[in-house]
Image (tube, coloured by chain):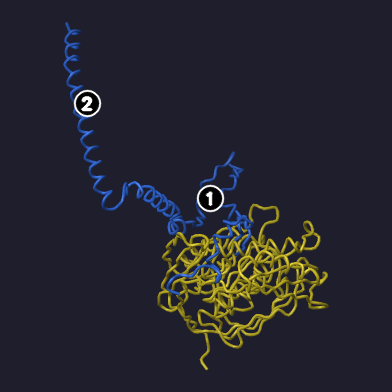
Chain colours: A blue, B yellow
Amino acid sequence: LSKPSQVSSGQKLGPQNFIDETSDIENLLKEEEDYKEENNDSKETSGALKWKEDLSRKAAEAFLRQQQAAPNLRKLIYGTVTEDNEEEDDDTREELGGLFRVNQPDRECKHKADSLDCSRFLVEAPHDWDLEEVMNSIRDCFVTGKWEDDK
Amino acid sequence: MATQAHSLSYAGCNFLRQRLVLSTLSGRPVKIRKIRAREDNPGLRDFEASFIRLLDKITNGSRIEINQTGTTLYYQPGLLYGGSVEHDCSVLRGIGYYLESLLCLAPFMKHPLKIVLRGVTNDQVDPSVDVLKATALPLLKQFGIDGESFELKIVRRGMPPGGGGEVVFSCPVRKVLKPIQLTDPGKIKRIRGMAYSVRVSPQMANRIVDSARSILNKFIPDIYIYTDHMKGVNSGKSPGFGLSLVAETTSGTFLSAELASNPQGQGAAVLPEDLGRNCARLLLEEIYRGGCVDSTNQSLALLLMTLGQQDVSKVLLGPLSPYTIEFLRHLKSFFQIMFKIETKPCGEELKGGDKVLMTCVGIGFSNLSKTLK
């Protein structure tokens, strides 16, 4: 007895769905028509598809903004507290048979702690200064480059 | 002990100089443990011991305790005294290693410092005396440290491993420092350089000049590279050659780059042409980084801003070097100063990479030991 009822309910739902879909499509079509009309209006006034042009620029700007936000310098510099806690490494180390201590492999910061004390900022990934576009990237740093309007 | 409680504790030999310098300026004792504790040859090296001896010479009443293996150092700073001093630097590091710290301390002495330093003037690791003379001295002048007695003179050149160089550094004392507002780096109007050669053919320097010019001429015509060939006792104990380049902007910013030949008996021989070209490219990299202060002197500028009068100081820098980042952390722990750090994107302009604007209010440090005349 349950099977037919399900079928009937399915049949009932079918047309309803269909109606919904058609109405949806109708709505969409209407919107599109409306939109086309708007487009026609804007063509006359301020040029076609202005929002689309903006889109790529906006995306580029948003991407750049995100890129800049990613290395939050203040957090990078002041966020991590690298204090030297004397007690910790004496107590928490495992002991083997109550006599030997397990010598943990050097962590990254430990390795850094004993590296060379030098103020020079070495260039890690040098640019290829023979390329025209790389050379152009610093053109305006020189007096021979382009000047700002106010100077 | 009462002072022990205020002391700051660090581990490892890295950043030893900035810790000791900031300790001296702030008066807070510092304890450094585990200096190369895990290495086959543990403890302080000769050049670090020499640095500590130098600090002892220019201060009065410092207490220095080093344990038997040299892995732990306790430093309780005395008063900066200054006066006429001579010091034999270790040849393991350049004189620049010592001079950088002296530049931080010299303005705050009781008596103006006049110091003779002997050792290696130019090497591949530390900023050379030529570069410090061309970049750090103009920077100090921006803070109001100026005068006839303010000079750095290279009497003799010395290359590693033998050394044998000699420089004279004299610096006047100041009670207070001027705050700075360096936000516009200006445009590069000229490039100057120094190609030096000691105990090799003087022709080496000319070959360096030609190759460096070939690259830099594409950007600016105003280039002059001096050649400096020292002879006899003035040429030190080891042969070598090198080049230092400095770009000067319309607003008085100096950006530098340098290269030196491999020390005698270490590594392959370097062609002067290659050295000149590579050094010119390094200068272009430095220009790409940009900012109002050379990447080597970032920490010096930030220190003097911190110690300035209670006023806002601003400086535009290129990307911060790892040394500078650690220095900022140390400034926070010694002086409780935190900088405002703003990233300035380069945008559409053809002016190299992104810049960083650093802002702080000085702590109003004043040199109380300076004698009034």
Task: Tell me the kind of residue under disc 2.
Answer: Glu
- CA gap between label 2 and label 1 equals 69 Å
Outermost residue on the top side: it is A1
Residue beneath disc 2: A21
Residue B133 is drawn in which quadrant?
bottom right
Task: Tell me the kind of residue under disc 1.
Answer: Asp
Q: Where does residue A31 sit, x and y in percent of width and height?
A: 22, 37
Q: Secondary structure at mark 1?
A: helix
* Residue situated in front as seen by the camera: B24 or B318: B318
Q: Where does residue B169 sit, x and y in percent of width and height?
A: 65, 80
Query: Residue at 25% across / 41% down in the picture?
Result: A36
Q: Where does residue B342 sit, x and y in percent of width and height?
A: 42, 63
Query: Residue at 62% across / 74% down in the picture?
Result: B55
* Residue situated in front as seen by the camera: B159 or A3: A3
Q: Chain of mark 2?
A: A
* Residue situated in front as seen by the camera: A46 or B174: A46
Query: Residue at 41% across / 73% down in the picture?
Result: B361
Mark sitting on residue B89: none
Q: Secondary structure at mark 2?
A: helix
Q: Nearer the viewer, mark 2 or mark 1?
A: 2
* Residue situated in front as seen by the camera: A12 or A144: A144
Q: Is residue A100 above or below residue A132?
A: above
The mark nearer the N terminus, 2 or 1, is: 2
Q: Is residue B246 above or below residue B281?
A: below
Q: Quadrant of the N terminus of chain A?
A: top left
